[in-house]
Image (spheres, rainbow, N blue to C red):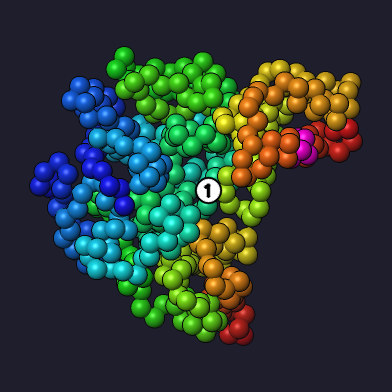
Amino acid sequence: MISFDFEYYKPSTLNEAVQLFYTLQIQKKRPIYFSGGTEIITLGRLNLVTPGAVIDIHDIPECKVLQVDEHHLVMGAALTLTEIEKANVFPLLSKTASEVADHTARNKITLGGNICGKIFYREAVLPFLLTNSQVVIAGPSGIKRVPIQDVFYKQLRLQTGEFLVQIVTNRNDLSVPSVSIKKRRQWDTGYPLVTIAAMKTKEGIRTAFSGLCPFPFRSKQIEDDLNQPQLPLEARIEHAIHHLPTPILNDTEGTSEYRIFVFKNTLQEIFTALEGEEHAQ
Amino acid sequence: MHNDHMFQISATLDVNGEKRMATFRPADTLLYVLRNQLGLTGAKPGCLNGDCGACTINVDDMPMKSCLMLAIEAVGKKMTTIEGLDGTPIQKAFIEKFAFQCGYCTPGFIMNCHALLKQHPDATDEMIKEWLESNICRCTGYQEIAEAVKSVLTRYLSKNNQ
């Protein structure tokens, strides 16, 4: 049970949502946007998130769109992970999303909620980092569409009053060879020790990571280290480890040493899957 | 639905085929309102964190953890709780296969299984495993629960009728 009270609003347009936020903020009601709401509810119960008002974006049509046209895939932030998985228009995203939480929870967890939430794994962002997608953000200055790498560093860097509306991905990237592997401490549900999403392009293999650090990331330096075919894969992975960001998580899911161990083995699996056994040596 | 004041809502909830009036706070979870306002105590509070599945109900034929949903989100949706199922194949199967012991997790499991079988009457073993990982049981070893689900699959029923 959530012990504190908050007001609930459900606007039907982007402009209405932004205006509401502004009004509620002036009234000092600490507004927060509400997508799936699973974090707001579970963290609210623990008094770790205490908004005075929530703005539910589900009635805003742009936030529920799932559309593929000649050039792009457009996905609304209020789509549930189950809806995304079922549509399967972006197989790498379907696979990554299908490993978040459990099946019933994914009927509620949304794309925007997973990416913008406080829980730092944010695994649903990994495929979009790999495909250099664009994010559509609504806010006091209007609607903007920007490359994800310009606004995502450890988390989506939203200004006050802004919220994620959609993510736009180049259609050509949807069917590129790809793989996503999630390793957990035990069982098939729960937080990751390491999640690696990867895709094979003409320039080489791109990789994005979650679970290793308290943020998801993609690193050009690591990709340069891993895409050196003249070196054996083990050597490439050792180089990459030297360029990992810090800190490496050390918690009840696993120690930092264990995470690195799992990271190395999972990278081996990734490269074997994408390069083939013969080349991934 | 109308706001009695900013922190109190009166609304009609469509539960088990009936329109029920309820008054609740925007911050109240659906689980809380079902149990405390509508007397539907079949959905159980377990972890209250969306992990255990004991609170599972069906919302528009989808299994949903009612501890992860605000009651206000349920306005306009069709809900089914365990009280709304009577003599369904999955319920009979749970009895026949001894798929419960203390019974606390059972309503949540049955609601999830019921939705699974409605959507996928011929679910594969992999799909059954994926769906049922949403629910935890501390008493059984899950084997009997899986057997109960499999016993009502279309392919099993047609094979045994031959």
Q: Is residue A150 magenta?
A: no
A28 shown above or below B77? above
Q: Decide: is A77 above or below A158.
A: below
Q: Nearer the viewer, residue B140 or B95?
A: B140
Residue B146 percent location from the top left of the image: 58, 71
Specify the amino acid type for callout 1. Ala
Q: Which residues are magenta?
A: A261-267
Residue at image location 64% in from the left, 37% down from the top: A250
Evaluate whether residue A70 shows in this view. Answer: no
Q: Secondary structure at mark 1?
A: loop
- Residue, x 60% and y 83% (percent of image)? B160
Return the residue at label 1.
Answer: A101
- A109 lies left or right of A139: right
Nearest the viewer among A74 and A38 is: A38
Residue A134 is situated, as x and y percent measured from the top left of the image, at 50, 22
Q: In which quadrant is the C terminus of chain B drawn?
A: bottom right
- Specify the principal SS of the magenta part: helix
Q: Quadrant of residue A246?
A: top right
How many other residues sit within 10 Å of disc 1, few (<14), some (14-19) or many (≥20)? Answer: some
Q: Residue at 61% x, 45% y: name it.
A: A252
Q: Is residue A84 left or right of residue A226?
A: left
Residue A31 at x, y percent in the picture:
27, 30
Res A208 seen here? yes
Q: Residue at x 48, y 44 (%)?
A: A81
